[in-house]
């Protein structure tokens, strides 16, 4: 099954270059439908003029962003953030997800590879 997601330019370019190997999302109903072996078609924001298709190779769920980001901090975040808490705060303050919806749903990490 194929799913649609959008990425801001910086993350899209990291995916395109092969640097980005994981996608972090709220574990809402839309994300719960994604299974290993499914494809995700990422559209580049803001104009969605470019797309990349990936395959989901691993799925991990977490109750809290801190645990989710801590697991992969060294690989995915240390170049841009001082510590795990800074990544969590950016999630909330950057307008990605609210604390309330995060507490309700938890979070999910998709390990992906370009097709």
Image (cartoon, grey):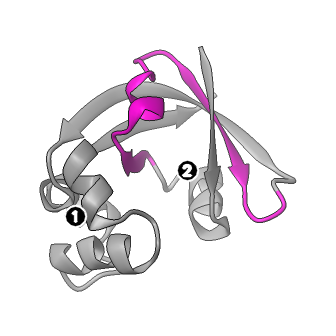
Could you say where residue 6 lies in the image, as x and y percent from the top left? Answer: 64, 50
Q: Which residue is mark 2?
A: 18
Q: Which residues are magenta?
A: 21-47
Could you say where residue 12 lies in the image, as x and y percent from the top left? Answer: 63, 58
Could you say where residue 99 lies in the image, as x and y percent from the top left? Answer: 26, 65
The answer to whether residue 91 is above or below residue 51 is below
**Foreground pick, 28 / 75:** 28
How many dots with numbers?
A: 2
Image check: 85 left or right of 111?
A: left
Image check: 112 left or right of 16?
A: left
Kindly report the distance in space between the C-alpha atoms of the residues bearing marks 1 and 2: 18 Å
For mark 1, give the secondary structure: helix
First in sequence: mark 1 vs mark 2? 2
Residue 10: image quadrant is: bottom right
Residue at x-position 20% and y-position 54%: 103
The answer to whether residue 3 is above or below residue 91 is above
Residue 13 in sight from this viewpoint:
yes
Q: Which residue is mark 1?
A: 73
Question: Is 20 colored magenta in this rendering?
Answer: no
For mark 2, give the secondary structure: loop
Which class describes the residues within 10 Å of circle 2: few (<14), some (14-19), or many (20+)?
Answer: few
Q: Quadrant of the C terminus?
A: top right
Q: Nearer the viewer, mark 1 or mark 2?
A: 1
């Amino acid at each position: 099954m194929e799913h649609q997601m959008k990425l801001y330019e910086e993350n899209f370019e990291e995916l395109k270059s092969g640097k980005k190997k994981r996608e972090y999302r709220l574990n809402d109903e839309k994300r719960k439908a994604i299974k290993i072996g499914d494809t995700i078609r990422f559209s580049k924001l803001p104009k969605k003029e470019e797309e990349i298709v990936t395959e989901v190779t691993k799925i991990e769920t977490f109750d809290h962003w801190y645990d989710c980001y801590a697991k992969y901090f060294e690989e995915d975040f240390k170049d841009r953030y001082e510590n795990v808490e800074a990544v969590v705060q950016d999630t909330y303050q950057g307008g990605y997800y609210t604390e309330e919806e995060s507490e309700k749903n938890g979070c999910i990490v998709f390990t992906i590879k370009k097709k």
